[in-house]
Image: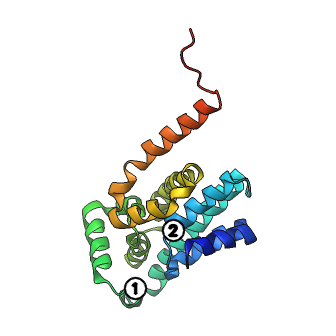
Amino acid sequence: MELESVLDLIRQYGYLSLFFLLWLGIVGMPIPDEAVVMTGGMIVAFGLLEPFPALLVTYLGVISGLTLGYVLGRLIGEPILQFLIRKINKQEYISRSYKLLVSYGSYTLCISYFFPVVRHVVPYLVGVGKMPFREYALFSYTTGFVWTLLFFSLGYFFGASIEQISRAVYAYGLYSVLVAPAAALAAWYWWQYRRGRFPVGSS
């Protein structure tokens, strides 16, 4: 699915399309979640959707898709890992997810958000490992909100660069995201300055 198709769906179906596009990411929709979230922010900047409902629906779509992975892992167990290996067709993502879990434990749920594909694998693994849902929700839902807000804001301020940002995130994962908050803050400050919210040179 091309980015332009995602944009058309959001224009046509609004809030529901944001939710289902992200929820379906768990079954391997061939477009990065980051691009969908940023497209939502860009649509808000165009004035086609209201900011708070769009952000809320986007967040719910993100966490519901990943929660589905956790539930499937917890209920089905080992067979879901074999399914993942066949579906992803790259054992490296399973191995990378295992290494993160061994190194960082529950905090892997936070770190994995910033690595495409790994983000979807880790909930399956912690579900298979029978992590308590309360612990899963604490780490995953909190980070999920920060992640959603970050990329939603990037789409709002830098909508024209969605494809480039998505490719950078996919290629470099967490490293490309480290500069994103600073970029978003700088863009917000510049936008406020242009609107006269931060006058300078007065005494």
Residue at horizontal 62 percent and vertical 62 percent from the top: 58
Residue at horizontal 68 percent and vertical 68 percent from the top: 10
**Residue 135 in view:** no
**Residue 80 in view:** yes
User: Residue 145: x, y in percent?
Assistant: 54, 55
In the picture, residue 172 is in which quadrant? bottom left
Secondary structure of the residue carrying tag 1 is helix
**Crowding at label 1, few (<14), some or many (≥20) Cα neighbours within 10 Å?**
some
Residue at horizontal 56 percent and vertical 59 percent from the top: 38
Q: Is residue 142 left or right of residue 170?
A: right
Residue in front for this viewpoint, 119 or 74: 119
**Residue type, numbered disc 1:** Leu
| Quadrant placement of the N terminus | bottom right
Residue matched to label 1: 84
**Crowding at label 2, few (<14), some or many (≥20) Cα neighbours within 10 Å?**
many
Residue in front for this viewpoint, 66 or 11: 11
User: Residue 17: x, y in percent?
Assistant: 68, 71
Q: Please give the count of numbered marks on the rendered protein.
A: 2
Secondary structure of the residue carrying tag 2 is helix
Q: CA distance from mark 2 to mark 1?
A: 18 Å
User: Residue 79: x, y in percent?
Assistant: 40, 91
Q: Is residue 44 above or below residue 127?
A: above
